[in-house]
Image (tube, rainbow, N blue to C red):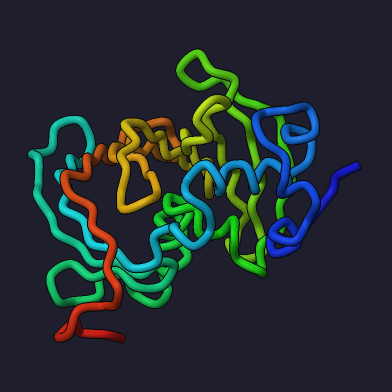
Amino acid sequence: MKMYFYAFVFLLSPFALCSGWSQAATDDPIALAKRIVASHGGAEKLLRILSFEETYVLGTSGKPTDRKSVLQPPLLWFVGKTERVSQENKRAICQDVWMWTLGPLVDPRTKLETIPSAVIDGKEAKGLKVSGSVEPAMEVFFDPTTSDLLKIAWKGEQFLFNAPVDVDGTRVPSKCTLIGKTGNLRVTTELKKIDRLAALPEGLNKP
């Protein structure tokens, strides 16, 4: 039987005291999510507003491109001073970046379900299905030792992550490879600088 849980429940649950990848933690989505968030500094340390500098390459033959962004996922992503994501594409772009911060795991709208593990880079990555705050549902996989995000499977595409870095009390992957629905390489990106922001900078063209 599938078991669905609201993410906010795990913040108050006795399972919050669990540590490590115990059998209970791997079978129960609340305990698993709690373990992941705790290993990244706790809910209060997750990135809410941030800036980063990145180098990305489109496909296999594109040229490296540098870009600076300011984000407040899941809704806002500015390149320069302009919001880059049209309203109709919010769910296609900003929600995957939001998952990269682990934000959906502490959102009260989120429903969690454990899913079978997946072997990623030789590791049996632990899986969660995340819905409610993210639609359509995402399947996300985490390193069994570090709890770092390894993969998002969403809308037929795969985001593969590595090279986690510490950012002001939390941790996020600094490299991502996006594989398209047909199995083609769409984008590779490397974040060079990531900073937590207290608020959105002045002068941004907000929608």
Q: Residue 12: give x, y in percent of width and height.
A: 75, 61
Residue 167 is left or right of residue 21, and the answer is: left
Q: Residue 38: give x, y in percent of width and height.
A: 56, 47
- The image quadrant that residue 90 belongs to is bottom left
* Nearer the observer, 16 or 25: 16
Residue 126 is left or right of residue 171, and the answer is: right
Q: Residue at x 66, y 46 (%)?
A: 129
Q: Residue at x 42, y 74 (%)?
A: 88
* Nearer the observer, 141 or 34: 34
Q: Residue 132: give x, y in percent of width and height.
A: 67, 64
Q: Residue at x 23, y 62 (%)?
A: 51
Name of the residue lying farthest toward the right: 1
Tag count? 0
Name of the residue lying farthest toward the front: 17
Q: Residue at x 53, y 49 (%)?
A: 155
Image quadrant in which the N terminus is located? top right
Q: Is residue 167 above or below residue 119?
A: below
* Nearer the observer, 55 or 45: 45
Image quadrant in which the C terminus is located? bottom left
Q: Residue 7: give x, y in percent of width and height.
A: 69, 59
Residue 95 is left or right of residue 50, and the answer is: right
